[in-house]
Image: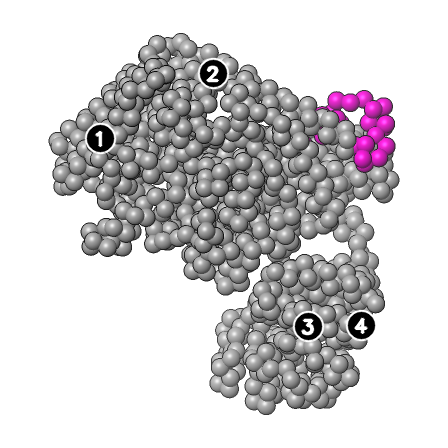
């Protein structure tokens, strides 16, 4: 969402939340979109909604949040599956809220596995000096509501058709008063808390390091002959299918954007690389199931084994977009340098897409907004007088002017972040470290870490624009800056040759070229300077990354740019270089970008690869990934597609119902995407294939 | 010291083992009708216009710069598993110029590969052999007169050079013959028989491929006309494959 739109929309939205009618209208608006996704047909969605309008329920906003959760869970329609895991959502029942929701994080599910509700209750009921009565009351009310909800589920299981009633009854009873003791039980417990998070309005819920969290219970069951590897594999597949159910409900900005990321593998504090059977089984399951969601992120290091890299590559080559690779050899150090404790950095997960964060330790609002690098540059040229523009007589002066404008934009953004108020959140507070010890809700700064994160777009367009100006105006003196700007303002109409030159400058973002790399680093350092002394009201800092979801929508608001991008065209995606001829150069470039300081909030190299290219060169491509880890990319993902299939799927969606593509940090069915995304993917695939036809 | 190149291609996966950088040296003394790199034939720098932009095929690069460019991907060569491939054109025509570079690369343990047609002065071959780890040798037309008329290839010289290679220290398992196939020039009974005889004498690895007309655009840019050549059917190439397979197990069909 554009920051100015957000500026207007968020207050309206928050205001509307405060009245019954307003809340209902918002619910209807949201549900309409979700039902259109669900039924893939506007009129069916409309009819369904009208028929069920009476079911829409919002909790009483006058109650404290703990009681609202209790009220909500009491109203939820229970729906017990006949077999496999139990997971259900009631899309009509909503929690009322009046501030920004805390979302887009993973709780540490090991806390849910190792503690029962009674353990938490006992903790909150302890006699303490300086008790924060409001906080404790919220927590106890929430716990009571959750316990009652579980009891209702148990009743429903009893009267269900399930064959395994006793087992599942005990799984649910144990949530109340015991820690989890078996692998299957652990999966069900994770699903239960995940369900509660979704039901209470949390969006983009990550799953955390499931191979690590489940390690002990899995091997205990295996060693005690309680479970075989095959059974575990089937359970994992069912678990993934359960997470995938309600895909339409869980999707956020676009269909598929659910934030359900499973983190696998990872470097240990002693430098060794952790992986286990489950690491492989989760990836195998994702490869076999071919669902766009949930997705996997594999934490890799130079010690990640060859067979795990090969399995990942095979999985990516199915086109499902998973796993994204995150390079622990780089990411962890950057987190520690920023200020995370070593142990927390080694245990990192990511927010919905790729933003590294300490699991279960912080508010970690990593995608609160985005910054458009191109905007300050275009502001100069859209708004300043010709006289002013002509007074910019060398590149240094231009860059200094750009930095001033960039600072203004950054300050605008800081103003928006400072205005944020978060919604009280007893569930997250229960799981996030220090909230309990501090007796302070996460929304009030109770967590151990209180950092804000933003993403950025259009870095590539900005680098290329600035470099083109430098070359064409100040070095080659082909025209004055004002003349160049005139052509740009005129959307480069009748300048076809120039446009080609601007778009295809051999020196561009993604080139392993000292000048381009230092320009790129200077731009991001300038933004870092705007943020580095900032502290939010909880003492947290701002972090940013170079990958962002909004490359299409943000582009729609920005005029033509000197990189040859026309009015309102999309920006380039992540760290990709559709102009690059070879993949090694892009990796060299990515490994020379400075991710220090606060610039570590997700930096993904986005590779477009055609499926046959990997298939025909599998061993060498696996080498490429392993050696690129050594070289030091930050994160990478692959979109394995060919333009022919995409073009055909656009024309005949019915023939390609299962075609999955990677969008930003998530995958989606191609058919579910808006036209603008389809066209951009097709265009990128064509460019990529042209480059490879050497 | 400079060399003349048309292109330096990183992440090249089909020109030898591992991940490689292929350096296309400009200039060739042959004139194969199916050539898919026509911009590499003339040693002269060739100007052309594309999308309104004035461009050139070919530029001179200092050995230092070239070395830097090659070493940019050193990590991807993975301790000698991959490396650099000199292609062209006929890369051995510029061998004298690049020897200092080859010495440096050899010292650094970078695997060095050449792709050659071998119709060159034998001195050049002798100069090169100490630096070569991997070698691709074309087999095109093995009939004296036709080789000369169609390709400008001196068959005696070719065979003499082959002997030099065969007696060199280049490991036999690192030598590969590459055979371009089309009905118009190379795929006829007589030529195939000659090829089979040659393969019996030099049992190196073999790669066969269909020639194609994909370079049409490049011919147009340098004002040359491409000779129309019909692409072989899979059946036709498979027949050749089977014949070669009878004498050597190490043959594969590749696409170029
Ligand atoms: S030897 Fe190679 S470069 Fe030279 S003309 Fe023949 S095909 Fe072209």
Residue at which label 3 appears: B106
Q: Nearer the viewer, residue A471 or A141?
A: A141
Which quadrant would residue A369 be assigned to in this image?
A: top right
Q: Chain of mark 3?
A: B
Marks 3 and 1: same chain? no
- In this rendering, position of residue A499 left or right of residue A104: right
Q: Earlier in the sequence, mark 4 or mark 3?
A: 4
Task: Please state the extent of the stretch shown in magenta in the rendering.
Answer: A374-398
Distance between the alpha carbons at the discs numbered 4 and 3: 16 Å
Which quadrant would residue B87 be assigned to in this image?
A: bottom right
Q: Residue at x 81, y 32 (%)?
A: A397
Respond yes or no on whether mark 2 lies under 8 Å from ligand 1.
no
- Judging from the image, what secondary structure is the residue with disc 2 in? helix
Q: Quadrant of the C terminus of chain A?
A: bottom right
Distance between the alpha carbons at the discs numbered 3 and 2: 68 Å
> Is residue A642 positioned above or below A651 on the image?
below
Q: Residue at x 78, y 84 (%)?
A: B123
Q: Nearer the viewer, residue A562 or A69?
A: A69
Residue at which label 2 appears: A13
- Judging from the image, what secondary structure is the residue with disc 1 in? helix
Could you say which disc has been placed on residue B97 in the image? 4
Say if residue A19 shows up in the picture.
yes
Main SS of the magenta part reads helix
Mark 4 burial class by Cα count in 10 Å: few <14, some 14-19, many 20+: some
Q: Does the magenta-highlighted stretch encompass residue A375?
A: yes
- In this rendering, position of residue A64 left or right of residue B56: left
Q: Chain of mark 4?
A: B
Distance between the alpha carbons at the discs numbered 2 and 1: 36 Å
Residue at which label 1 appears: A176
Task: Estimate the x, y position of residue B47 in percent, counting from the top left.
Answer: 82, 58
> Which numbered disc, 2 or 1, marks the residue closer to the eye?
1
- Judging from the image, what secondary structure is the residue with disc 3 in? helix
């Amino acid at each position: 969402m554009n920051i100015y739109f957000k500026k207007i929309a968020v207050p309206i939205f928050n205001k509307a939340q405060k009245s019954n009618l307003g809340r209902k209208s918002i619910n209807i608006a949201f549900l309409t979109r979700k039902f259109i996704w669900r039924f893939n047909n506007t009129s069916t969605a409309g009819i369904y909604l009208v028929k069920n309008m009476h079911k829409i329920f919002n909790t009483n906003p006058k109650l404290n949040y703990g009681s609202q959760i209790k009220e909500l869970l009491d109203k939820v329609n229970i729906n017990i599956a006949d077999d496999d895991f139990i997971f259900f959502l009631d899309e009509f029942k909503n929690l009322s809220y009046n501030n920004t929701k805390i979302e887009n994080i993973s709780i540490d599910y090991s806390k849910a596995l190792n503690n029962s509700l009674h353990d938490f209750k006992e903790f909150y009921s302890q006699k303490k000096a300086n008790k924060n009565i409001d906080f404790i009351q919220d927590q106890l009310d929430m716990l009571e509501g959750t316990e009652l909800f579980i009891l209702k589920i148990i009743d429903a299981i009893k009267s269900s058709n399930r064959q395994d009633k006793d087992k599942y009854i005990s799984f649910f009873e144990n949530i109340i008063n015991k820690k989890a003791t078996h692998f299957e039980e652990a999966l069900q417990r994770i699903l239960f808390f995940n369900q509660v998070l979704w039901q209470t309005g949390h969006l983009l819920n990550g799953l955390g390091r499931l191979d690590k969290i489940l390690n002990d219970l899995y091997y205990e069951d295996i060693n005690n002959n309680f479970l075989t590897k095959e059974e575990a594999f089937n359970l994992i597949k069912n678990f993934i299918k359960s997470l995938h159910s309600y895909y339409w409900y869980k999707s956020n900005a676009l269909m598929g954007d659910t934030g359900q990321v499973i983190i696998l593998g990872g470097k240990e504090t002693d430098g060794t690389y952790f992986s286990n059977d489950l690491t492989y089984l989760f990836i195998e399951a994702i490869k076999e199931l071919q669902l766009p969601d949930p997705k996997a992120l594999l934490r890799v290091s130079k010690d990640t084994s060859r067979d795990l890299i090969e399995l990942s590559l095979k999985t990516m080559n199915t086109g499902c977009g998973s796993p994204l690779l995150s390079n622990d050899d780089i990411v962890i150090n950057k987190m520690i340098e920023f200020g995370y404790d070593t142990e927390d950095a080694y245990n990192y997960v990511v927010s919905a897409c790729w933003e590294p964060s300490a699991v279960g330790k912080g508010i970690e609002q990593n995608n609160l907004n985005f910054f458009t690098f191109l905007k300050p540059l275009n502001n100069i040229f859209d708004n300043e007088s010709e006289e002013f523009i002509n007074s910019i007589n060398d590149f240094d002066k231009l860059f200094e002017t750009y930095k001033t404008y960039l600072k203004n934009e950054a300050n605008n953004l800081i103003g928006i972040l400072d205005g944020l108020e978060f919604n009280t959140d007893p569930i997250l507070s229960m799981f996030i470290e220090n909230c309990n010890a501090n007796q302070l809700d996460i929304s009030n700064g109770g967590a151990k870490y209180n950092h804000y994160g933003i993403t950025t777009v259009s870095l590539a367009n900005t680098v290329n624009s600035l470099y083109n100006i430098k070359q064409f105006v100040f070095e080659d003196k082909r025209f004055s800056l004002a003349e160049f700007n005139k052509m740009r303002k005129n959307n480069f109409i009748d300048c076809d040759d120039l446009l080609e030159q601007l778009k295809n400058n051999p020196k561009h973002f993604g080139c392993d070229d000292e000048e381009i790399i230092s320009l790129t680093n200077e731009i991001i350092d300038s933004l870092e300077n705007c943020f580095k002394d900032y502290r939010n009201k909880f003492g947290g800092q701002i972090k940013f990354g170079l990958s962002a979801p909004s490359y299409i929508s943000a582009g729609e608001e920005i005029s033509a740019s000197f990189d040859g991008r026309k009015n309102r065209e999309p920006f380039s995606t992540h760290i990709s270089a559709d102009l690059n001829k070879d993949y090694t150069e892009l990796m060299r470039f990515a490994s020379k970008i400075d991710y220090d300081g606060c610039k570590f909030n997700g930096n993904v190299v986005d590779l477009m690869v055609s499926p046959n290219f990997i298939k025909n060169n599998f061993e060498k491509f696996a080498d490429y990934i392993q050696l690129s880890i050594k070289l030091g990319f930050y994160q990478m993902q692959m979109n394995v597609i060919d333009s022919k299939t995409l073009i055909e799927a656009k024309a005949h969606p019915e023939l390609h119902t299962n075609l999955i593509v990677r969008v930003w940090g998530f995958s989606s069915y191609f058919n579910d995407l808006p036209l603008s995304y389809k066209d951009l993917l097709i265009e990128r695939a064509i460019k990529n294939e042209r480059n490879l036809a050497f | 010291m400079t060399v003349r190149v048309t292109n330096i291609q990183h992440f090249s996966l089909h020109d030898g083992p591992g991940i490689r950088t292929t350096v296309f040296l400009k200039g060739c003394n042959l004139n194969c009708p199916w050539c898919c790199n026509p911009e590499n034939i003339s040693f002269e720098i060739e100007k052309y216009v594309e999308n309104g932009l004035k461009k050139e095929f070919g530029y001179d690069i200092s050995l230092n710069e070239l070395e830097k460019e090659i070493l940019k991907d050193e990590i991807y060569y993975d301790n000698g598993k991959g490396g650099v491939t000199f292609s062209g054109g006929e890369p051995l025509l510029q061998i004298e110029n690049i020897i200092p570079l080859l010495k440096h690369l050899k010292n650094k343990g970078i695997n060095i590969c050449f792709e050659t047609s071998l119709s060159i002065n034998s001195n050049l071959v002798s100069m090169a052999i100490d630096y070569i780890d991997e070698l691709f040798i074309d087999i095109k037309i093995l009939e004296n007169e036709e080789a000369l008329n169609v390709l400008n290839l001196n068959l005696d010289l070719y065979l003499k050079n082959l002997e030099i290679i065969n007696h060199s220290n280049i490991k036999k398992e690192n030598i590969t013959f590459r055979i371009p196939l089309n009905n118009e020039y190379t795929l006829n009974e007589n030529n195939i028989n000659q090829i089979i005889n040659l393969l019996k004498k030099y049992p190196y690895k073999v790669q066969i491929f269909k020639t194609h007309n994909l370079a049409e655009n490049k011919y147009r840019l340098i004002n040359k006309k491409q000779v129309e050549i019909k692409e072989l059917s899979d059946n036709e190439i498979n027949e050749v494959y089977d014949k070669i397979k009878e004498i050597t197990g190490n043959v594969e069909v590749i696409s170029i």
